[in-house]
Each structure stands twice: as structure tokens, then as C-alpha cells.
Amino acid sequence: MCSAHTMLRYKIEKTSCLSPHVCQLGWAIFVEPVHDSENLPAHIHKTAYEICYIAHGTVDWWVGQKQFEVGPGFVFITFPGETHGGLHDIMNPCELFWAQVEFPRGEKLQGLSRSETIFLADKFARMKEHCFPGTPETPVLFKGIIDEHRRLSEHSSILVRTGLIELLVAVIQAYEAHQHSKMSNTAYSKVIRQVMALFDDHLAEEIKMDDIARQAGLSVTSFYRRFHEEVSMTPGEYLIQRRMHRAKRLLCDSAMSITAVAHALGYSSSQYFATAFKRVTGVTPRIYRETSLVRHC
């Protein structure tokens, strides 16, 4: 069960939503790993897209036989009819927004023509990836829609309908920008890509941010500000995420001992590594390995 001391959640069900096209809407903050047996076990939305945005932290979700590690600033979408859930039924420390949206069959989204509705529905149907970077306005639009449900004014229904359309368009634009950046390799600036490569090359070592900033040709202040602007997290948060990401990949290699994984990531002992890993993921490396090998890593 989820404790009030470890999470905040505001969830709006279909009967209370101000748009007939939204099956569920919500926002939540998890301050530590939480076993969520209500929302994270395997489930399907038969007719709805579920659009999630991770504002802070990282989550481990799965769709079918694929696992996804979704970081801050990313959109994660599941498509109608897909079986999905949370790895180990655990929500890692994070802040996230979500909406389950249905495109009406033979009708139109409120505020749009039938042809415009078909246009947006077709854009979503053509998406081939579940996870991609969002845009700065994505969390703002989510928050605006949720706030209208919380304060309920005479204008709220109108604002929710227009906000939903804006959100759907913003998600489409983010997806298309991601496709373009993959082809042109422009997701991050050259200097930030250089920093990311330095992190990945030295995960097993003690990394000093002053040294990284100097190698990038930036002052420490400029380095922190620029990194956060582009990556949506601090360099320290990114470094932890990359170490845990590498740990998860290594744990999928059953021939590698947990002690060897710990040493490969610069931890002095397997116990220290296990403590750090569980703090982020909510499970021990051993449990992660045993359950994750059931799915493709």
C-alpha cells in the first residue's frame, strides 16, 4: 500500500473529469520507492492512450516484453490494447503527470472539427516509440488542466478542453522533434554530449564536477546551469541515473556476480552498492536480477 508519508497524489477519474475524452488524469510525487499494488500490476487500457510525463526522478516501466527506464523530462506513452505496468510494482522516487485519452470514433474532440480530430488521432497512431523527450510546456499544460479541476470556476470546462488539445499537439510536436534530432544528432549540444561521454567513460571512478566543467571549457556555474537546461536534471542526478542504468544492464548478465557489478561501478563493496541501488529502485540487486531476467533487458 502507499503511505501518505511517502507520496502525494491527485487523481481524477472519468466521472469527475471535465473532458469526456479523458478517462483518468493525475499528478503524483513519490519521495521514496513505493510498492503500488493498485496501479502498477499488469493492466490494459483497451481504447485509451496513456500519456505520462516525468518531471523529476526516474521510473522503470514495461510494455509487453520490453523494459523502459524513463528519466526526467521524458514523455512515456502506452497505446490502446497494450499490456503494461511498473517493474516489481514499484514506483521509484519521482514526480509525474499522466492522462488517459480516448479519440472518439466517428465523432470529434470538443473544440475541433472531425478532420482535425482524425489528423491528431492519426499522428498518435503513427508513433513508433513509447518514450521520448518532452518539451518545457508539457508539464505546464498538464498542471494547467489539473489545476482547473482543483479550483473549478465557470471557465474550467472550456479551459480543460482547450488545454487537452494543446497537450496533445505538444506531445506530437515533441515526438516529431525527437525523430528529427535522432536523424540530425542534435538532441543535445556538442559540449553536453561531450560531458555525457565523459561520465559514461568514468562511471567506475570518482568524478569531480570541477574537473568535468574545466574539460568542457565552462565555469562550474555555467556548467551546472547549461546541463540542467538541456538535460532537465543536475549533473549529479544524471551521474547517479547513469550508474544505476549501467547497473541494471550488468545485472541482466547472469554470469556476472553482484560483487563484480558493484566494483565495475566504483562501489567499494557489494553491500554499499546494494544500499544505493535499493534507495533508487526500491528492490535489491538480487531481486532485480531474478525478476528482470523474465523480461528482455
Image: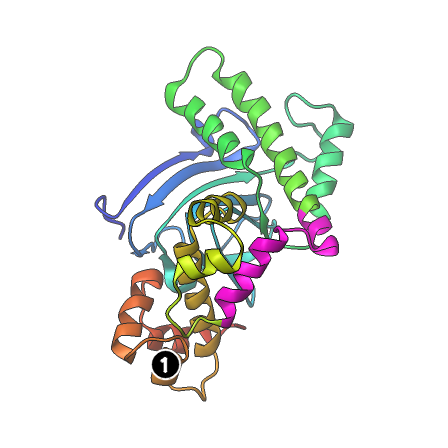
Is 24 situated above or below 76? above
Region of the chain picked out in magenta, as a range: 178-201
**Image check: 215 left or right of 107?**
left
The residue lying at 42 percent from left, 37 percent from top is 26
Which one is in front, 236 or 86? 236
Q: Is residue 85 visible?
A: no
Residue 115 location (% of width, % of height) = 78, 29
Residue 33 location (% of width, % of height) = 31, 56
Instruction: Identify the residue under disc 1.
Output: 263
Tell me, yes or no, whether the highlighted magenta stretch contains residue 189. yes
**Image check: 82 left or right of 209?**
right
The residue lying at 44 percent from left, 57 percent from top is 238
- For label 1, count other residues whose C-alpha is less than 10 Å away and answer few (under 14), some (14-19) or many (20+): some
**Image check: 38 left or right of 293?**
left
Is 154 situated above or below 136? above
- Kindly identify the amino acid type of the residue bearing the numbered disc 1: His
Q: As drawn, which residue projects farthest toward the right?
A: 115
Main secondary structure found in the magenta portion: helix
Is 224 situated above or below 156? below
Residue 24 location (% of width, % of height) = 47, 37
Tell me, yes or no, whether the highlighted magenta stretch contains residue 294. no
Q: As drawn, which residue projects farthest toward the left?
A: 5
Q: Secondary structure at mark 1?
A: helix
The number of callouts visible is: 1
